[in-house]
Amino acid sequence: MFLFQNNRIHTSKYNVLTFLPINLFEQFQRVANAYFLFLLILQLIPEISSLSWFTTIVPLVLVLTITAVKDATDDYFRHKSDNQVNNRLSEVLINGRLQSEKWMNVMAGDIIKLENNQFVAADLLLLSSSEPHGLCYIETAELDGETNLKVRHALPVTSELGTDISRLAKFDGVVACEPPNNKLDKFTGDLSWKDNKYPLNNEKIILRGCVLRNTSWCFGMVIFAGPDTKLMQNSGKTKFKRTSIDRLMNTLVLWIFGFLVCMGIILAIGNSIWEHQVGDYFRAFLFQDEVVKNSIFSGFLTFWSYIIILNTVVPISLYVSVEVIRLGHSYFINWDRKMYYSKKETLAEARTTTLNEELGQIEYVFSDKTGTLTQNIMTFNKCSINGKTYGILNQRSVILQEFSHNKKNSKFQFYDHSLVESIKLGDPKVHEFFRLLALCHTVMPEEKNEGKLIYQVQSPDEGALVTAARNFGFIFKSRTPETITVEEMGKVVTYQLLAFLDFNNIRKRMSVIGTNDTFEFGGEGLRTLAIAYRDLNEEYFKEWFKLLEEANREFDKRDECIAAAYEEIEKDMMLLGATAIEDKLQDGVIETIASLSLANIKIWVLTGDKQETAMNIGYSCNMLTDDMNEVFIISGHSAAEVWEELKKAKEILFGRSTGFTNGYAFCEKLQELKRGSTVEESVTGDYALIINGHSLGHALEANLQSEFLEIACICKTVICCRVTPLQKAQVVELVKEYRKAVTLAIGDGANDISMIKSAHIGVGISGQEGMQAVLASDYSFAQFRYLQRLLLVHGRWSYFRMCKFLCYFFYKNFAFTLVHFWFGFFCGFSAQTVYDQWFITLFNIVYTSLPILAMGIFDQDVSEQNSMDYPNLYRPGQLNLLFNKSKFFICIAHGVYTSFALFFIPYGVFYNLAGEDGKHIADYQSFAVTIATSLVIVVSVQIALDTSYWTVINHVFIWGSVATYFSILFTMHSDGIFDVFPNQFPFVGNARHSLTQKNIWLVILLTTVVSVMPVIAFRFIKVDLYPTLSDQIRQLQKVQDKARPLKSHRRQPRRTSSRRSGYAFAHQEGYGELITSGKNMRVKNLHPTSGLGKTMYNSTSWIENLCKKTTDTVNSFSLDRTVKL
Amino acid sequence: MERNSNDVRGLLSRMPDNTAFKQQRLPAWRSHLTAWAVLPGFFTTGAFFLGMGILLILSAKSVKEIEITYTSMCSNCAKLRENASNFYKECTCSVPFFIPEKMPGNVYMYYKLHNFYQNLRRYTISRNNRQLLGEDITNVENCAPFQRDSNGIPIAPCGAIANSMFNDTILLSYYPHSSTRINVPLLSSGITWWTDKHIKFQNPRSNNLPSAFTGTTKPPYWRKPVYQLDPENPENNGFLNNDFIVWMRVAALPTFKKLYRRIHRTGPFANGLPAGNYSFDIAYNFPVTVFKGEKGVVLSTVTWSGGSNLFLGIAYLTTGAVMWLAAFSMTAVHLKMKKRNIVSES
């Protein structure tokens, strides 16, 4: 028995009652929190307890509270969005009437009416729609990220129900289907109705999350509701990305934990020995009648006691502080005006707040082309008709060509007046050219109110061509399955459509065979590039059409036969002209790429476009230059060819001496790759690699991938064209896995989602229509050029700050905690703490938390301008120089040294100390206060040294922390608080007695100087002897001598190649089949073929003069060259 | 037009604020370790430390200090005390000694214990400050294992610290001539911290101290109840007894000295202790040999920096020397690098 769910969805995790238990349970699943809970339990055992309960519980509660508050806010917003979704209204057929009902009350079996542009409430079986044949269009962007419209059609039997409410209400079909699952493209089931069974498939199902488009209404029956819907079944947990620093941090925390256990063991052994030699007698004296304990057992208890005391080396506040810092950095990204794109009012957005420092470590950038490097705005800006080229850009003035008789697209800009002239003069070839543009396409017109004509386009370049024709007076008005109506210079002409040869990727062309009265029009258009036509006579066409129909009837080799038939007719074409659709590069792309390459970031372009386009873009953004040593083009169709081509490339790179492994010894090869880049450095010169999608498929196979990767990594530029989304992800994974490098993928479209998700950091270009890439991304902004700022400024700073933070944090905790360890040797290993318990409680969360947070959030070593100007500053991040295991050990050593000084200097002094008034001040409490005060001052001085950018906030926090320490110290040592809690605050009067002694201050001063002096000396010598680039630039900044740049680091990108534009090509299968099937046409639109006068120009002798090219050569036409004809 | 203005407003609202904070342009001072800051800093600090070191050593040297460890000198008594059954037996011991130089000014007398771990964790927490405040003298919480005696009567003062209180009495005698003996007048006042005497320790409020402590018993190691600690000065009894207060301020390290008496500067001792023969007359009560400890007496004068403390002076001197060394080598490195930079630039 399957239990049907209602349509209410829950993405929220908690409600008011369950929040506390569930959230706490979740939080204690984290190792760090569980560890502190364990400590807390240990502290409740009186034999072990060496610290009061509050020393652990206060930080723990603080950490838990911060996390809980964050979780609660997140969940609150989820509740809000759930409520909003659940309370959306949809029209449900109840008791024979349509009623508005909330989404959450919709049940499986209900019949729902949907209207245009509405979200679908549940998974529906499409019953009927406003469109003929029960068709309806949906957009599935929210589900799978694809923006193109998809068609669903109802069963003929149900589509007859139409909009008849009473019949729909009586609909009593029974659907038997598969159980709920997450497969978006599959559905199996059948509908039993009126004693008949009808099979159902995915074509009849509309899924929740889709949007109804171009369909004024449709009816559907709910099959799955709420959590059963495919959308909800698919909303699994997204992969949680972690930064390399995160992973390093976890390892280090484990090491520290091991270190803690070691210290515990040493002290426990010490305790056993001490108990054996001294303690037994001494305790017998002190505690008289107590049973003498086994010294081994005493050591065991001591071990746990010390684990409690020394627990502060494993810093509980580490993770929370790291999160806070990253959040701060994320806000800085969101707030950055220099990454705000005012044209589209788009802000940069850090969608993931936990990856910031990894932005400072990127080595590989994988970029999409269309819409990422380019604007993805197709403009028709050049054309060649009959050998004459129009529209050579001249920048001096923008003359908007005006046509009185059409509703002009105001954005349309064309600079060439002569074309307008020739149209007005009625040049037949020009007219033919634009007529073809207006006819040969798959655009769907949509007449909106006010007579506005909107084109539904599948690819933007197609839209650009039709719009261009429209702007030159050839307005595509409407289409039916058999006709196309065009308004030509004011006259409405209807063409009979005979055959429609849709675009596909193999032929790379599309043809429309049509006619008017006289049966002689034939044309073929290569959509974006060349426009050619062919006159066909009737007999030939009829013969051919027969061939096509036969091919259509064929079962086994249908596709091949149709292709052959298409090939038959699409030959002997006459070239009419060519169009140039330009997809302009975004602003600043060249500079950004140049700057990123200077920062040693390798940029790979992964595009779905064809090779020529991709190369053009490569040239136009200086990734390819004419003076490159070699550009390898891998375009083999089989593994053997690819292997051959790679081999050749390698021979050129390394010379023949280097043997090419035959691919099966790739394991060793990969090992080599992992070891490092020694091979790479031996190769000099600029190389580029261009690889095709099908070749890439072979290159990514296990036996070739090492070779491919090796060659690709040597090349300065890598361009992969014609790649599928999956291949994009595979390339990213390959680099991630074998180069152990930090990768970033940037893209704007649904086809980039996979690579955005698999790269360490995914960046989405926002502000465009599709939001899918942005939704999948970690960072988003509107323009590619902001990547430079994101990486070189924000990323670098984040990395720099995070590393400094971690170094200091570990140092601080070791300096703080290890004092207990030293003291252990002088207190009989009795787990006596050096400090007051309150000090232990407050040290990390009050006395020292804010200065380090301020440094972690605000610090800057060099200014943002210099970060941009000297991309070499980015190197340390890539090499992981600022925080790694050896840095960690240096920090630890620094901490150990400081703790040593902190303990042994006061020890030496207190060994025989008397006050100025002769009174005894070598007491435990004075000792505690002296060391605690020294510690606070030492770590404050240290953070002051580490802070390189002293804003007001840093001043307030650093001075404020020291001031806070003293005020809390004096408060806790005051008479008043002692009177109330004498047992909790036993340090009464201590501060005022010890801190008025000159001796104590001399101790504090000495400790501070001894702790800090070596650090200053070391840093000074290091800057003097081995200055880093950062040091030099800081020096430069200091001198304010910005006019003198460092020669070796500043190199203007050479602009060697001629400026080329990127021309775009669409390559998706079109709507052709749908159009000719007529399924999408409304009956009312079907006009009889108009007989309005229309003369065809048969005499096309000029075109023979132009050129007699076969279609094949036309195919590979690069527009760049076309324009240069 | 209206739409345009709307657009402008919308644009302004989306655009991040141009504040120094949000744009990370807060005015700031960029710290940098320049030679001009570091090298003079090292030289001056080094000089200060050297000077201070010399000063500290000189003043430590000027302090006159005499330490006499009497555990071995009073071995008879030490033996006696090792056996708990001799608890109430008196044992006195006289330790003669010679002061070669005059001890000018205020002279302080300390007792010093070696190998006595007053900083053991369980020891340091075995006390009750509330009881010592005199508010609730039967409050013996936290005082394990000395909370109550075998009859269940609460101990006052409770706890291990109080129980183990140092209870030798030490008298100082001066022998101006071999036959003459003058008892050096000793003061037991002014040896405690003001806050201890006036805030941390209070006697229970009562006209009669013994009656205030009724219902409690003395710690097992004590010979006399807390209200009879000083038979000579009734004010110096109960929780306010100076020796008791001093003892209760536990020492940081296992070897420590605590102030026992001040020399009363009257008569021949108005200017301190003259050179000559002296002796300590000790009522040996405190057993230390059972835990391999030692005890002694220290006589010391003080200076501006307290008692004799050579360590601090030596540490300052060493640090100052190291800083100068570092400063010189840094200067050398810096000059060399500067030269090389100039050469490479030209």
Image (spheres, coloured by chain):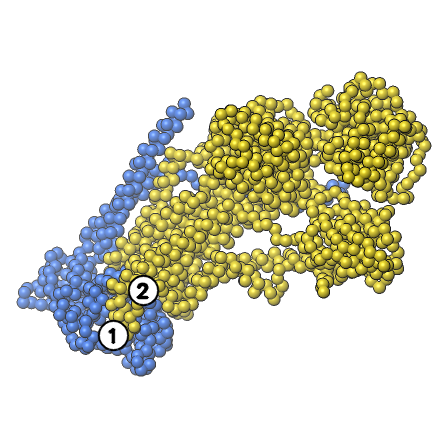
Q: On the rendered structure, is A180 left or right of A985?
A: right
Q: Is residue A1109 visible?
A: yes
> In 3D space, how far apart are the residues under numbered discs 1 and 2 (Cα atoms)?
29 Å
Task: Residue A408: name its quadrant.
Answer: top right
Q: Residue at x 47, y 40 (%)?
A: A880
Q: Is residue B244 visible?
A: no
Q: Name the quarter where the C terminus of chain A is drawn.
A: top right
Chain depicted in yellow: A
Q: Which residue corresponds to mark 2?
A: A296
Residue B243 horizontal/vertical position (percent) = 25, 69
Same-subunit check for callouts 1 and 2: no
The residue marked by circle 2 belongs to what chain? A
Q: Nearer the viewer, residue A992 or A247?
A: A247
Q: Which mark is residue A257?
A: none
Q: Which residue corresponds to mark 1?
A: B221
Q: Residue at x 41, y 70 (%)?
A: A980
Residue A180 horizontal/vertical position (percent) = 70, 57
Q: Residue at x 57, y 35 (%)?
A: A704
Residue type (three-letter) at the residue carrying disc 2: Ile
Residue B299 to residue B282: above or below = above
| Colour of the chain lettered B | blue
Mark 1: give few (<14), some (14-19) or many (20+) Cα within 10 Å: some
Label 1 residue SS: loop
Residue type (three-letter) at the residue carrying disc 1: Tyr
Q: Residue at x 47, y 51 (%)?
A: A250
Q: Nearer the viewer, residue A788 or B187?
A: A788
Residue B90 horizontal/vertical position (percent) = 16, 75
The residue marked by circle 1 belongs to what chain? B
Which mark lies nearer to you, 1 or 2?
2
Residue A727 horizontal/vertical position (percent) = 63, 39
